[in-house]
Structures are given as structure tokens and as C-alpha cells.
């Protein structure tokens, strides 16, 4: 007779699988700690899938499967570049493929991506299910095709489905029956295959603060990133060394997704321009720490005395992104000190004074349980998260 696995989006079932499960969906949306094993009442089983089969059933069963919110699943797709724009382009490509291969007996030309999303939402709202697997019109084809069209990539299909649902809606992959039926082992479904994104920075303090900030603010994304260990591998830590490292990866034709992060200061931007002028593969993304409002009128100490200046592109190392509370001492911002003049750029290079003090304050801030102010760090993290987004 066999067993089925089902994934539900806000309780609506899609992607049924007999005697197995869709590993690609698990790899795209979930992490091992999303797997749950919990006792539930038989009467709680999804009514759309089971109808009244368990309505009057007493007792409990052990649910085994994945659960996560739309917001988190969507964010996990986005860090690899899936977006509204990409999904819209992918939909247009799929329409062309389906037309060239004569997959549908009707024309998709009249159905825009926006109309496609509206049709998915209408199906969710009506909870309409059709097991006849008909492809006679657009709506029936979506019902038969797991809410997607022929030729669509899985990540864009999933992103489109998630886009029409509330962020707090739950995505649930029920693997109870295929596990209990012996079709797949629990240990096996917890093995999730995904490619980590390597983040390269100018120094080890950047690695420490960015990685721990992701863990604190976006714990559901932390496993997707890998940071280089400067100490273990005895790697030189500065902007020019980062350029050499990226050139080496490029020359070796490394296919891994890589993000290179440069400080938003005089030296960092000079070295970054040197790298951008080279032809690099699409898997390598070159970023700088973003400009921030905090730095537009920031106190500085230098040859011209004490002065408030825009220190974006002059003196924004990682310390400038640790929060106003961390940068404040005795009710005033700790100033930026101008350290030297860069002849090539015809600009001064600056850094925050009392750097070690600022760093220790932030370390203490990271381990506090209370909610703290992370505005500038959040801007920086989202720059990282959007690195592969189509501009």
C-alpha cells in the first residue's frame, strides 16, 4: 500500500511523495534543528489531507518531520540569491521552455508572474484540492503541478509560494508515515546537504564580531556561513592580503560561494578597487562595509583639531558597526583618530580611538540576554545576506 510524506504551507499540502520524501526541498528550506519529534493527537492530523479519517480517533501518534516559519525559510532562500526579481525572470524562462516543448495545450502568454502569484494565493485561500491531475487550464495545471509551472526551478517555485503567505505561517514537512513505514530512516532525513558561503574579511576581529552577531541576531542562518580562521592557518590579516587571497581563489577556479568584505576606510576601498578591476567569477562577491548615518557627522581628532566629519570611506572599520552604546564613553562618542595620510588616495586613514576598550564592551554586549541596539551591525549583516541578490 505504501506511505506518503507531505509538505504543507500554512496547512495546504503540496509536493506529495510516495514511500520517500523530497530531499531537495529539505536542503533548501530546513536545518537539522528544525526537525521535531513530538506526540500529537490523531484528531489533529491535517483535515485537507486526511478528511474525517482521524476525526473520532482517540490517542496519540508521534509526529516526525520539519517545522519552520515562512519568514525563516524565505530568508534561507534569499541568502543564495533567490528573490522576487529572480523568481519573475525564472517564471518567464519557464513559460518559454513549456511553449517550446509544447507541454501545455493552452497558452501561458496571458498569465504574468503577478497573475501567477495571485492564482496561488487564491488556491491557498480557497483550500482547493484536485487529485485529477488535469492540465486543461492554468488553475488546474497549478493544482496538478505543485503550484508551479513546467520548467520552473525549484528554489524559485518555493520562493513564489512563500511570497503569498504571511511571514508567521508554518511550513511543515510531515515525514511520520515514511519513517514509521521503514521507507527512510530518521537519521537519513536529518542529513541536510547545502553549500556554505565563505566569508573573508580583513582581520580576525571582523570574523569574531560578524559571526557572533549572526548567531545572536539570525541564529537560523548561522550554519550557512563559514569564516576563515586566521590563527589556525596563520593567514595575514589586512586589506592587501585579502586581495591576494581572493585572486588565489579565482585563479584556482574555486566554485564555492565566497564573499570578500573590505573595511569602509581609505585603505580598504583602495584595495577593493584593485580587486574590482579584475575579472572575477560570479560566485565571488566583493563588498565593503556599508555607509551608515552614524558616521556622517562623527567626532574626529587630527591635524585640524577636533571636528565632526563624515568618516564613511575614511575610517569605518568593524568598530563603527558595534552600536552607539558601545561607541559612547562618558556621555560622548569615542572619536576617530587620523592615523596617517595615504598618498595614492590623497586621503587620511582613520580608526576609532580606544579600539580595545570598544571591542571588550561589544564582547560583553554579545553575551547579554537582554535586547540591545544593533542597528549598524544589522545593516552590515543584511549587506552580507543580500550579496547574491540580483541588482
Image: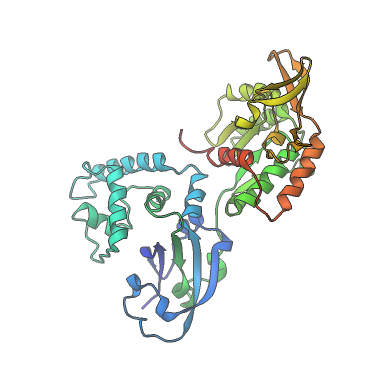
The N terminus - image quarter:
bottom left
- Vertically, is 118 above or below 128? above
The part of the image, by quadrant, that contains residue 334 is top right
- Vertically, is 331 above or below 273? below
Instruction: Check the image and name the residue furthest to the front.
Output: 331
Q: Residue at x 34, y 75 (%)?
A: 50
| Count of labels in the image | 0
In the rendered structure, the answer to whether residue 47 lies left or right of residue 242 reads left
- Vertically, is 139 above or below 176? above
Residue 276 x/y as whole percent: 58, 24
The part of the image, by quadrant, that contains residue 309 is top right
Q: Residue at x 33, y 47 (%)?
A: 151
In the rendered structure, the answer to whether residue 254 lies left or right of residue 18 reads right
- Vertically, is 69 above or below 346? below
Residue 218 x/y as whole percent: 59, 50
Instruction: Check the image and name the residue furthest to the bottom.
Output: 58
In the rendered structure, the answer to whether residue 197 lies left or right of residue 140 reads right
Name the colouring of the figure. Answer: rainbow
Q: Residue at x 55, y 42 (%)?
A: 385
**Residue 228 in view:** no
Q: Residue at x 55, y 52 (%)?
A: 194
Name the one closer to the observer, 323 or 235.
323
Residue 119 x/y as whole percent: 27, 52
**Residue 347 in view:** yes
Name the one closer to the observer, 257 or 362.
362
Name the one closer to the observer, 308 or 69.
308
Name the one closer to the observer, 9 or 189.
9
Amino acid at each position: 500500500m505504501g506511505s506518503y510524506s507531505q509538505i504543507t504551507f500554512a496547512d495546504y499540502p503540496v509536493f506529495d511523495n510516495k514511500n520517500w520524501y523530497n530531499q531537495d526541498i529539505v536542503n533548501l528550506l530546513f536545518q537539522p534543528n528544525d526537525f521535531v519529534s513530538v506526540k500529537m493527537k490523531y484528531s489533529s492530523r491535517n483535515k485537507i489531507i486526511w478528511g474525517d479519517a482521524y476525526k473520532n480517533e482517540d490517542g496519540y501518534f508521534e509526529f516526525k518531520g520539519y517545522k519552520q516559519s515562512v519568514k525563516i525559510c524565505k530568508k534561507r532562500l534569499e541568502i543564495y540569491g533567490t528573490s522576487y526579481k529572480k523568481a519573475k525572470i525564472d517564471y518567464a524562462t519557464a513559460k518559454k521552455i513549456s511553449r517550446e516543448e509544447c507541454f501545455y495545450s493552452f497558452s501561458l502568454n496571458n498569465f504574468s508572474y503577478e497573475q501567477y502569484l495571485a492564482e496561488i494565493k487564491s488556491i491557498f485561500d480557497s483550500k482547493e484540492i484536485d487529485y485529477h491531475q488535469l492540465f486543461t487550464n492554468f488553475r488546474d495545471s497549478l493544482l496538478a503541478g505543485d503550484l508551479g509551472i513546467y520548467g520552473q526551478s525549484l528554489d524559485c517555485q518555493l520562493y513564489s509560494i512563500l511570497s503569498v503567505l504571511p511571514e508567521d505561517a508554518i511550513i511543515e514537512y510531515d515525514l511520520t508515515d515514511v519513517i514509521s513505514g521503514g521507507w527512510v530512516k530518521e537519521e537519513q532525513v536529518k542529513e541536510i546537504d547545502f553549500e556554505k558561503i565563505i566569508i573573508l574579511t580583513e582581520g580576525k576581529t571582523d570574523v569574531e564580531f560578524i559571526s557572533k552577531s549572526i548567531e545572536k541576531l539570525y541564529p537560523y542562518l548561522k550554519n550557512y556561513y563559514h569564516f576563515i580562521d586566521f590563527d589556525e592557518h596563520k593567514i595575514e590579516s589586512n586589506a592587501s592580503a585579502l586581495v591576494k587571497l581572493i585572486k588565489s581563489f579565482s585563479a584556482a577556479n574555486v566554485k564555492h560561494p565566497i564573499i570578500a568584505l573590505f573595511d569602509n576606510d581609505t585603505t580598504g576601498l583602495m584595495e577593493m578597487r584593485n580587486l574590482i578591476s579584475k575579472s572575477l567569477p560570479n560566485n565571488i562577491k566583493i563588498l565593503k562595509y556599508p555607509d551608515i548615518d552614524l558616521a556622517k557627522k562623527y567626532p574626529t581628532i587630527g591635524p585640524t583639531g577636533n571636528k565632526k566629519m563624515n568618516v564613511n570611506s575614511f575610517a569605518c572599520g568593524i568598530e563603527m558597526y558595534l552600536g552607539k552604546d558601545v561607541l559612547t564613553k562618558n556621555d560622548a562618542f569615542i572619536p576617530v583618530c587620523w592615523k596617517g595620510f595615504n598618498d595614492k588616495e590623497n586621503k587620511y586613514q582613520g580608526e576609532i580611538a580606544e579600539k580595545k576598550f570598544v571591542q571588550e564592551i561589544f564582547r560583553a554586549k554579545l553575551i547579554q540576554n537582554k535586547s540591545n541596539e544593533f542597528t549598524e551591525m544589522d545593516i552590515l549583516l543584511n549587506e552580507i545576506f543580500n550579496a547574491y541578490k540580483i541588482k
